[in-house]
Image (spheres, rainbow, N blue to C red):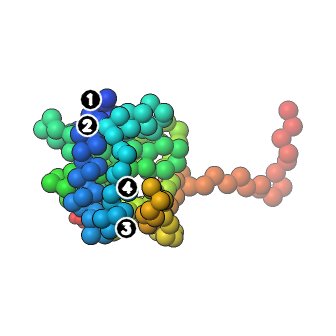
Amino acid sequence: MIIRPMARGDAETVHAIHGACLTRTLLGRYTHEQITAWMDGRTPEGYVRASEAGERFFVAEADGVVVGYASWEDDELLSLFVHPDCQSRGIGSALVEACLADAECTGGAITKVKSVLGAEAFYAKHGFASECRGSTAKRGVEIPDARMRREHPGGPVQLLASPGAKPFQP
Ligand SMILES: CC(C)(COP(=O)(O)OP(=O)(O)OC[C@H]1O[C@@H](n2cnc3c(N)ncnc32)[C@H](O)[C@@H]1OP(=O)(O)O)[C@@H](O)C(=O)NCCC(=O)NCCS
């Protein structure tokens, strides 16, 4: 398996993986109405546009076939989907780690994710902790999620004034 940046030619497959995850993996945790609202209006071109606007997408490819994707922007992991036939083989973990590493390489850090209900245990394995429940409205339908945060491995930077330190004078 390799992880690589998404190319324009991957958009159809990425879109299909998203749809398969919603209708096969997430139906049951979400209602039919919620799944329909979630998918409504999405097109392959939408992933390309988001990528061109700055969202960083990676795909996982196994034997030349794209089987999963993930994306992040600013300090947030925005999407993570592995085709239902290929889940539980370490692909999702590899995609998360690729995004975390990409953020580090570009001088940033991913510190939050809106987890779908039921995936909190997966994200906990990657250092995210649940903060609260939230929801996003799509096409007027509320889609609940779990807001999770992860501390940047470098930790928050603290400037400590040491007692007796002389102020810097050029
Ligand atoms: C969540 C998801 C991306 C994980 O990808 P994956 O390739 O199946 O994950 P991995 O194989 O790396 O799994 C690693 C571990 O997490 C566990 N895991 C996977 N999905 C899980 C879930 N939904 N809830 C709890 N644990 C989960 C696996 O059992 C595995 O545990 P183990 O190593 O102790 O056996 C994938 O299941 C998926 O696409 N689900 C549907 C869409 C989704 O929920 N996306 C998250 C959007 S916020």
Residue 96 visible within the image: no
Q: Earlier in the sequence, mark 3 or mark 1?
A: 1
- State which mark lies toward you, 4 or 2: 4
Is 42 on the left-hand or right-hand side of 128?
left
Is 117 on the left-hand or right-hand side of 20?
right
Q: Compute the Cα span from label 4 to label 1.
A: 23 Å
Q: Disc 3 marks which residue?
A: 117
Q: Against 19, is 1 above or below?
A: above
| Amino acid type, mark 4 | Trp
- State which mark lies toward you, 2 or 1: 2
Q: Disc 2 marks which residue?
A: 12
Q: Earlier in the sequence, mark 4 or mark 2?
A: 2
Q: Secondary structure at mark 4?
A: helix
Q: Secondary structure at mark 3?
A: loop
Residue 53 visible within the image: yes
Q: Position of residue 78 (x, y in %)?
A: 43, 49
Q: Disc 1 marks which residue?
A: 9
Q: Residue at x 36, y 63 (%)?
A: 34
